Image (tube, rainbow, N blue to C red):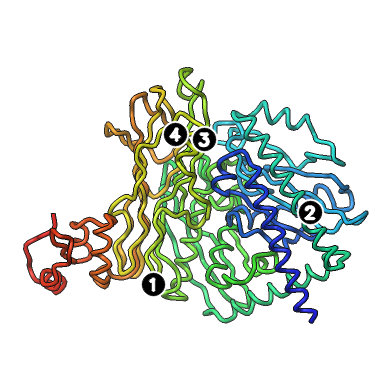
Amino acid sequence: MRDIRLQVMWNRLVSVVEEQAQTLIRTSFSTSAREAGDVSAGVFDLEGRMLAQAVTGTAGHVNSMARAVKHFLDEFPAETMEPGDVYVTNDPWKGTGHLHDITMVSPTFKGDEMVALFASTTHVVDIGGQGMSPDSRQVFHEGLYIPILPLIKRGEMNDWLLKVLRHNVREPVQVEGDFYALVACNERGSNRLLSMMAEYGMTDLSELGSYIIEHSHRGITEAIEKLPQGTWTHSMRIDGYDVPIDLVASLTIGGGKVLVDYSGSSPVSSYGINCPMCYTEAYTAFAVKCVAAPRIPNNTGTLDAIEVTAPENAIVNAQPPCAVVARSTIGHMLPDVVFGCLHQALPDCVPAEGTSNLWNVRLAAGHGLTGTEGTTFNVTSFHSGGAGARPRQDGLSATPFPSGVRTVPIEITEAITPIVVWRKEFRTDSGGAGKQRGGLGQIMEITNREDVPFGIHAVFERVKHAARGRDGGLDGLRGQVNLASGTVLRGKGFQVIPKGERLIVNMPGGGGYGEPTDRDPRKVQKDVRNELVSRAAAERDYKVVIADDLSVDESATAALRSGKNLRRIAS
């Protein structure tokens, strides 16, 4: 009966933090939180151990925030905290990886006794500095750096900090609004926890917390022990900023633990694509857990079974004062690297490589950027290329794996800026061919309706190095950013789109899985009908001939697949 009671309370605790996260989304001002869900929320014990996380949110935020609370307690020990306190930071090395992420921690008191800590994170639209482009050379170029300090003390707001904040960002209303949303969501979590404790007659979380961590750790340990034991190594080359970046991982399974070592990866960059260790740990742990224990709730107990190491000043373990604004350029690629290791140990278990790196459209205009004409704005609109094909299913199109954020509807972006999106559609033939097809990227065509210049903070990967297919599957199509006039833009860095020009964003596709000629011709036919695959690509890659009426030419397909010479039918 005790275990059943504790399991029910555990489930209830998960619902508490989910309501905490939903409060953050409902009250946030910026599109990154209220539309894309680029947030995290969780509850912690008095030692800073995460007991439960909200399902809503991103792996990068959740898993790095899971380690962040201990940094808060190092600065402000639990015994010094008081009712009504709220603490804040955006320290990239003690928070979630870059200055745009704000992490807040609030103590919860039951009477005079502190019983828990609530933490939450959101990505704000602006934090000053050079903006979201990786043009920065040091973290000091990237905006306002807030050390761990009190935002609210005994219920009194630190107005001086808010004044400094407002004077250092381009969107003061949105950013300050998000600060208050973080306060509100922690308070909602606290209130719901106290209601739960009253309902179950709990005086503290010690028994429940121990049960959660012990059972979770035992569960993931048992799952890891069932996996093949040994060491596997994999590498992946990506675009980087000015030179290609190599990501190298050795993954060892043994003793109930998974160790991932990134020795051999490229050194830090001179630009803002470096990744602090907290973010590296977050996405590495996410990838391991996807395979080893996907159904065990995520908390300190599960995360402690996964150890991540990397040499200091490797690009995955950047040290201050490295520029880190676009740390997701590296972090989002790490699951693909880990999957490459796991595929050797567990064939037919992990997907092919995907776009992985978000293709967010970050647009801005104003003095010093594009000139003084027209409306000044700064907006991030979340969008994605294709995910890699899975062993038994096609890859998901225009889907943000591994980040999990939602796409921002173009109507929202158009409503708050002078931007117009004239076209947003799947990019035909962008998914890598395979028995299972890679997910498609998309095409967006964008202008400024005020007929003045606007700029893009480009942070795009898979422009030079495509998402690779697996087990005979073909690579996905590489991405490209260009103007309608034909000028090709760089994949990274701030660039101005002249007035009257249209920006064309061609997002990459995911890699295919398995031999393309093993794909059912009827599936190829369906893809051609849906304009996901062209007739030419169907014949070239899948050896399936589609007739003018979009039916499968059975005899021509059989001849082509048997290797006989045949006059090309598809155009």
- Counting residues from the N terminus, which is met first, the one under dot 2 or under dot 1? 2
Determine contact: label 4, label 1, CB under 8 Å.
no
Which residue is the site of mark 3?
379
Q: Secondary structure at mark 1?
A: loop
Question: Along the horizontal axis of the image, is 371 left or right of 29?
Answer: left
Q: Amino acid at mark 2?
A: Ser
Count of numbered circles on the image:
4
Determine contact: label 2, label 4, CB under 8 Å.
no
Q: CA distance from mark 2 to mark 1?
A: 43 Å
Q: CA distance from mark 2 to mark 4?
A: 40 Å
- Counting residues from the N terminus, which is met first, the one under dot 2 or under dot 3? 2
Question: Along the horizontal axis of the image, is 146 left or right of 524?
Answer: right
Determine contact: label 3, label 4, CB under 8 Å.
no
**Furthest residue to the right?**
112
Relative depth, front residue between 83 and 46: 83
- Would you identify the image quadrant in which residue 92 lies? top right
Q: Secondary structure at mark 2?
A: helix
Of badges 2 and 1, nearer the viewer stands 2
Q: Which mark is residue 190?
A: 2
Graded by Cα atoms within 10 Å as few (under 14), some (14 to 19) or many (20 or more), the crowding at tag 3 reads many
Q: Which mark is residue 456?
A: 4
Of badges 4 and 1, nearer the viewer stands 1
Which residue is the site of mark 1?
392
